[in-house]
Each structure stands twice: as C-alpha cells, then as structure tokens.
Image (cartoon, rainbow, N blue to C red):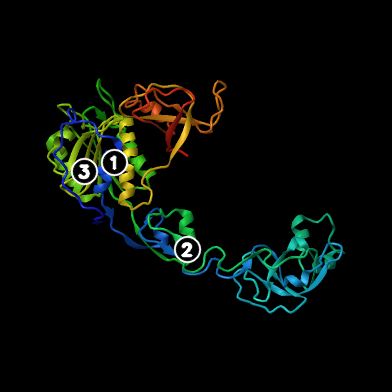
C-alpha cells in the first residue's frame, strides 16, 4: 500500500506528558515528517485522477496549439495583400470559401485571395494573418441592402457583414495578427506539470490539451476518525448534566474534506482501554492514517494516552503551543500512522492544521506541505502567551478602523475568540477565517502590530 521514503527509527520511550519538557511545534512537525511514508503511486486515466497528486513530471505530448489557428472570427489573408487598406480606401479580396473549427481544409491562397475563418480554425498554410470581420465589409451587405432595413434585428444585421465572393478590407494587418502560432503556449516535450503538483481542474485541462491520457499519481490516503469521551452524546440526543453534543467527528471529517480526502471512516468508542485497543488494532490495519480526539492529557482517565503508551513507535509529548499542547503521534503496530489530538474542538482543529495537514500532504508527495503564511495588521489588541506559540483563530477585514494608521499590509485581522479562552471556544471558532501565529518571544499583541497569519477560508 505504501512506499518508504525515509527510514523509520524506533521512537523513544513515551514520556509522561505532564513531566516532559515541551518541544517546539517546528521540532514536533520535523519528527513527524522525517518518519512519514508516501502512498504508492498508481497509473490512472486522466479523467479519473482529479484531486490526486502527480508522482512524476509530465511533458507535453504535442505542441500547444497543435497548429496555427485563428484567434478571431474573420478572414485568413496574406498580410501583404492588405497593405494600405483604410475605411475610405478598402482593399478588395476574393473569398474562396470558409474554414471552420475542426476542418482539415488547407486552401492555397494566391495574391488577392482569402478565406473566411472561424475562431480556433486552422490557419491556411499560405496565410499569415487574420482580419477580424469587424474590420471588413462583405458583399452580403450590399446584396441584401435593398431587402433589409437598417432597423432589422441585430442578428440579421450581423449576418450582413460577411462576404461570399468579395470582401472589402478596411484595416491593414501585419504578419501574425490574431493568429495563435503552433507551439506558442507549449512545445512538444515542454514541462506542463511537476511531480508533487495537485491535479486541479485547470491542471487536468492543461494535461488533456497537451495530449496526456494517463498520469502516475498518488491518491488520497484512507483515513479513520476515532472519537472518545464519556461526556459526548450523539447529535439530537437528550443531554444530562455533564454531557455535551459530539462535534469533533464532524470537525475532523470537514477538515479532511477540505484537504480533498473523502474516504473517511468515523468510529466512536467509550473510555475503555480494551475497547480502544481493539478499535486501534482494527482501524490501524485497514487505513493509512487514524485521527483521534480526546484522552491524550495527563489525567488518570485519559485512555488514549494510556493505551498508546504501549505502542513502541508512538510518542506522547507536550508541544509548546497554545492551544493543542498534549499530542500522541507515531506509527501503530497495526500499520497506520496515528495522530491522537486533544479533545477540545479548537485544540483539535489547531493540531490538525499544524501537524496532520502537512503529514497528509507528505503522504501524497505534495510539493508544498503547509499553507502559505501571510502578514496582517492586528485590528485589535489581545493577550499573548510567552514561551509558546500562540495560535489564535481570527477573522479578516480589509477596512481599516479610523483609529488605525494605514499599514504596509492591507490584510487586517481580529480575534474570533477570547485570547484567554481559546481551546473550547467552538462557537467563536465557527466564524474563524484563519489563524494568527504569535511567536513565543512576542507576548501581548497590540493594535496595529504586524502578525503572521494562515488563511484557511478564501
């Protein structure tokens, strides 16, 4: 199912996260990516490969365009024949016929001859330019002038511009005017897409136009989501004291879908060690990756951490990040990679963005594993978190507040949640359009400061 891209050394013994020294987010991600494996590539028909990631460079099988063709509706001409043409002194050319898109007719043009040509139609070999129909007067117009009123419908009047026998050229053209040259976009053998590129709609269209019928790609990994938590109840259930609706499975499925991953199996289990072990063994043997939420803290009932302590290639760490400090990560004995994330929804979402998303993209061989990071101006002040990376859900605005002096960056951000109560603020997080990343040395953020942001909503 997978091909190895890096050796997988045994993980160190899992430390008690309550006692371990916090590792930086960068170090934790580096540990993960150094051990990640890629999905084995498959050769797929291009039409079945949308949303996958290319596993090799792809070069054009033929030139783009395949032949010189017309960029406009008009007349294919020998440009020298139009020399001196003006509306007052047009040049008359004989019309031999019409070349439509898809036609294989290649008429020879002698001096003083032309053909009607439609957009995308092959340019006759003996022509070197196109005169747009709007720059001509056709004999249909003169022949029809006695039977068609100037008040005729627009579609009727547009027909009058074309010529069947003789066309009057009212504007001179030079070689190459309104001609798409053979190979001007890509020549045969030119690079069209690179290994690691996602096969988007536009990229797939480009490959099809370049004559590519099959591509070697890596498909999205199969993912299982396992949710634990005695307090979590199904949506719509009657809630007793201490119970809350279970929302993390929907959160994880949505985040995975935003990564293009739709093969997702969702499972739920109680906070019982034997049940959790059985679920991890089953899911780990049938999926590429398992994501869990809840039960990774230092508490006596944090069952996921307790169970994963017996997995030799899974480590439990404290990451110097707020929210999302406790993490259990590594490869299960059953085969799949596991990300055991905190149970608070915003902590789980932040952990997914920082660690799971880059890992998923690495599994697919993506050239870029993380989103671009931008600079934005803080449109309000908020409390920081020295000594660790603060990841604050934010919304963006383009409209400066009157109290703020214009900044170099037009992008502005506001906290979507209270900076001191982030991890559980699922309501405010629902409006978030991105995350502000405030370094451990920064401390408080003041209105007008420049901050690094990740934009997750376009």
Report which residue position mark 1 lands on: 29
Mark 3 to mark 2: distance in Å?
Answer: 39 Å
Q: Vertical placement of 437 versus 134: above or below?
A: above
Image position, residue 204 (x, y; %): 45, 58
Label 1 environment density (alpha carbons within 10 Å; few <14, some 14–19, many ≥20): some
Name which residue lies at 87% across and 62% down.
88
Mark linked to residue 330: 3
Disc 1 vs disc 2: Cβ atoms closer than 8 Å?
no
Q: Which quadrant holds residue 237?
A: top left
Q: Secondary structure at mark 1?
A: helix
> Which residue is situated farthest in the front direction here?
441
Q: Vertical placement of 329 versus 299: above or below?
A: below
Mark linked to residue 208: 2
Residue 160 in sight from this viewpoint: no
447 left or right, relative to 132:
left
* Chain-order first, disc 3 or disc 2: 2
Looking at the picture, tell me which residue is in the foreground, 270 or 199: 199
Q: Secondary structure at mark 2?
A: helix
Looking at the picture, tell me which residue is in the foreground, 348 or 37: 37
Image position, residue 185 (x, y; %): 55, 62
């Amino acid at each position: 199912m997978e091909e190895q891209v890096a050796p997988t050394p045994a993980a160190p013994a899992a430390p008690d996260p309550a006692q371990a020294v916090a590792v930086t987010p960068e170090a934790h991600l580096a540990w993960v990516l150094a051990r990640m494996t890629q999905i084995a590539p498959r050769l797929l028909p291009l039409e079945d490969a949308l949303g996958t990631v290319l596993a090799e460079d792809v070069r054009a099988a033929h030139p783009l365009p395949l032949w010189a063709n017309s960029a406009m509706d008009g007349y294919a001409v020998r440009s020298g024949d139009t020399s001196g043409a003006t509306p007052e002194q047009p040049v008359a050319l004989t019309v031999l016929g019409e070349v439509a898109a898809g036609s294989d007719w290649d008429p020879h043009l002698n001096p003083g001859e032309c053909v009607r040509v439609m957009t995308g139609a092959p340019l006759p070999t003996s022509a070197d330019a196109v005169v747009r129909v709007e720059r001509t007067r056709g004999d249909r117009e003169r022949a029809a002038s006695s039977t068609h009123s100037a008040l005729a419908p627009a579609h009727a009047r547009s027909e009058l511009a074309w010529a069947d026998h003789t066309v009057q050229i009212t504007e001179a053209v030079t070689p190459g005017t309104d001609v798409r040259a053979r190979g001007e976009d890509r020549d045969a053998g030119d690079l069209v897409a690179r290994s690691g590129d996602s096969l988007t709609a536009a990229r797939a269209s480009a490959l099809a136009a370049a004559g590519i019928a099959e591509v070697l790609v890596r498909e999205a990994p199969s993912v299982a989501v396992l949710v634990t938590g005695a307090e979590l109840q199904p949506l719509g259930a009657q809630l007793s004291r201490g119970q809350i609706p279970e929302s993390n499975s929907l959160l994880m499925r949505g985040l995975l879908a935003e990564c293009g991953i739709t093969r997702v199996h969702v499972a739920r289990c109680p906070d019982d060690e034997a049940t959790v072990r059985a679920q991890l063994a089953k899911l780990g043997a049938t999926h590429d990756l398992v994501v869990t939420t809840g039960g990774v803290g230092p508490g006596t009932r944090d069952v996921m951490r307790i169970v994963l302590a017996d997995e030799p290639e899974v480590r439990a760490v404290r990451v110097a990040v707020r929210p999302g400090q406790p993490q259990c990560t590594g490869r299960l004995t059953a085969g799949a990679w596991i990300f055991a994330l905190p149970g608070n929804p915003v902590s789980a979402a932040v952990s997914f963005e920082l660690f799971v998303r880059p890992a998923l993209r690495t599994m697919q061989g993506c050239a870029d594993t993380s989103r671009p990071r931008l600079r934005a101006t803080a449109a309000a002040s908020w409390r920081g978190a020295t000594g660790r990376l603060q990841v604050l859900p934010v919304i963006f605005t383009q409209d400066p507040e009157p109290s703020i002096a214009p900044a170099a960056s037009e992008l502005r951000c506001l906290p979507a949640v209270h900076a001191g109560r982030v991890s559980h603020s699922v309501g405010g997080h629902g409006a978030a359009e991105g995350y502000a990343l405030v370094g451990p040395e920064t401390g408080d953020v003041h209105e007008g400061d420049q901050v690094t942001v990740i934009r997750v909503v376009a």
